Image (cartoon, rainbow, N blue to C red):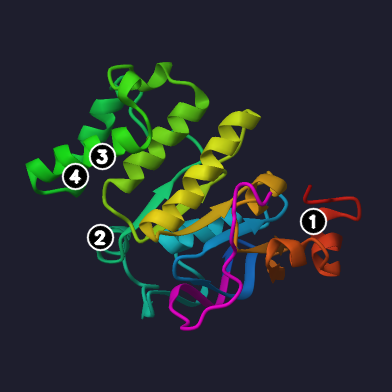
Amino acid sequence: MSIIKKFRIKSFKNIDTVIEFENVSLSYGNRLILDNINFKINKNSIHGMLGPNGAGKSTIFNLITGLIKPKSGKIKVFGEDVTEYPIYIRTKKFQTSYVPQFGGYFNDLTLHDNLKAISEIVIDNKNLRVERINNLISKFEFDNLKEIKAKFLSGGQKKRLVIAMALLSEPKLLLLDEIYAALDILTIKMLQETIVNLQQEDQITTCICDHQARDLLATCDVAMILNNGKIVAQDTPSNLVKDINAKDAYFGDSFKLN
């Protein structure tokens, strides 16, 4: 675990909150999805979300991006109430990028043309587009994959492509939904290192949700457990796995980090 993340942000001298949920509730019909939840994600941290299926992890991402609105409560981004803001304002004004669990790329475009297509939407200056694409191709070691259509890339290569596409707009906040799902061990390790490097080198605040508990905790500064619409525990990975509420709701008694 320590090989992936050599340091953890356990406390902040100056609290600079990127995301804040204040008493947020959401229901679909008679089904309560989120029940009056409160949490903060601090600047330049890697924040993890764990929980069983239907606990509300992806719903929280949809609330942050503006795809859905809460029944009650406030969602703040960089201290500003964005509860009523549409998706495009949250994306542009607050520099938020989202990497979905599935897809996120154009199947029949090459890797390079996928990056080019998104760059034409998020970057006005043509020269800057070329520069940023070339930087990302170098950063992700895509040189030998540039002319391959996305549909022919491996699962890990597709994930890295979608992350690169999300980085074209130089986001301050990156949301990663089930980033480790259905990937082999070596690919997961490569993605973990990528995420930690984005924190260290680019100061990007990242929020990850996943079912791969060990893989997620290997990259996080802080993680929280959701269950039955509530946050039952939140702490550093080493403390979280010892928390009795986290054990009862998610980990069980036999879970170990290593």
Query: Are there few (<14), some (14-19), or many (20+) residues within 10 Å of tag 4?
Result: few
Name the magenta segment's main secondary structure: loop
Closer to the chain start, of discs 1 and 3, is: 3
Nearer the observer: mark 3 or 4; the answer is: 3
Farthest-out residue, left: 126
The residue wearing badge 4 is 121
Q: Where's residue 35, x and y in %? A: 65, 72
Task: Mark 3 and mark 2 in contact? Answer it, CB < 8 Å.
Answer: no
The residue wearing badge 1 is 250
Residue 219 lies left or right of residue 94; in this view the side is right
- Element type where label 4 sits in the image: helix
Residue kind at label 1, given as amino acid type: Tyr
Q: Residue at x 77, y 51 (%)?
A: 257
Query: Are there few (<14), some (14-19), or many (20+) residues within 10 Å of tag 1?
Result: some
CA gap, disc 1 and disc 4 = 41 Å
Q: Is residue 104 visible?
A: no
- Element type where label 3 sits in the image: helix
**Frontmost residue, 5 versus 26:** 5
Asked if residue 82 is among those painted magenta in the image, a careful observer would answer no
CA gap, disc 2 and disc 1 = 36 Å
Closer to the chain start, of discs 1 and 4, is: 4
The residue wearing badge 3 is 135
